[in-house]
Amino acid sequence: MATNTVRLHRVLRTSPERLYRAFVEPGAFERWLPPFGFTGKIHAMEPVVGGAWRMSFTNFGTGHSHSFGGKYLELVPHKRIAYDAAFDDANLPGTMKTTVTLTAVSCGTELSVVQEGIPDMIPVEMCYLGWQESLVALAQLVEPDIPG
């Protein structure tokens, strides 16, 4: 298994509760997780420990899709999420693990993301770039406080 790892850290102007929801609600997850230039589709999401999730990203320009999914390993509401994922493509072997930690701070929530086991065929810097784009979209989803 590959040992390639990316680590990301942000402070977002939102609550841990709202950030947690962005990871476990299908419509929210498919809205912010795909990097720029991709659309996302959730095919299954059962956010309980041991529950499965599955989604695909589609390149908006080419229409080419890739799908992946895994299981939830840890869910501590508003604090911690861990899940694994494997690609359906045999050229991208192995299982990745993503761990998300949420910590309330004075101005919002500190977000830490660690993704381990990125397949060797995916350059780590591209994965890091994709995550940076995803976190911009995440902030755009969770930071606005729009009245009812």
Image (cartoon, helix red, strand yellow):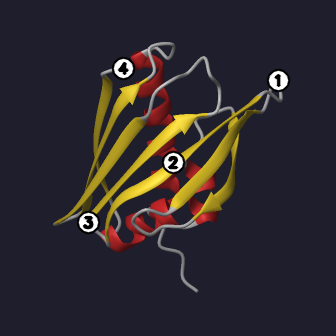
Q: CA distance from mark 4 to mark 2?
A: 17 Å
Q: CA distance from mark 3 to mark 1?
A: 37 Å
- In the structure shown, which secondary structural element does the residue marked by tag 1 occupy? loop
Give the residue at mark 2: 70
Q: Earlier in the sequence, mark 2 or mark 3?
A: 2
- In the structure shown, which secondary structural element does the residue marked by tag 4 occupy? loop
Please name whichever residue, 26 or 134, is drawn nearer the observer in this view of the structure: 26
> Which of pointers 1 and 2 indicates the residue nearer the eye?
2
Q: Is residue 13 above or below residue 15?
A: above
**Quarter the N terminus occupies:** top left
Task: Give the image location of residue 72, x and y in percent.
Answer: 42, 57
Q: CA distance from mark 4 to mark 3?
A: 27 Å
Q: Is residue 36 left or right of residue 80?
A: right
Residue ID at (50%, 36%): 133
Residue ID at (64%, 33%): 88
Say which quarter of the image contains residue 129. Answer: top left
Say which quarter of the image contains residue 89. Answer: top right
Name the residue type under label 1: Thr
> Which of pointers 4 and 3 indicates the residue nearer the eye?
4
Q: CA distance from mark 1 to mark 2?
A: 26 Å
Asked whether the residues under the numbered discs 4 and 1 touch, taking CB atoms below 8 Å apart as contact, a structural biologist would say no
Asked whether the residues under the numbered discs 3 and 1 touch, taking CB atoms below 8 Å apart as contact, a structural biologist would say no
Give the residue at mark 3: 79
Q: Earlier in the sequence, mark 4 or mark 2?
A: 4
Mark 3 closeness class: few <14, some 14–19, many ≥20 residues within 10 Å: some
Give the residue at mark 4: 2
Residue ID at (51%, 23%): 93
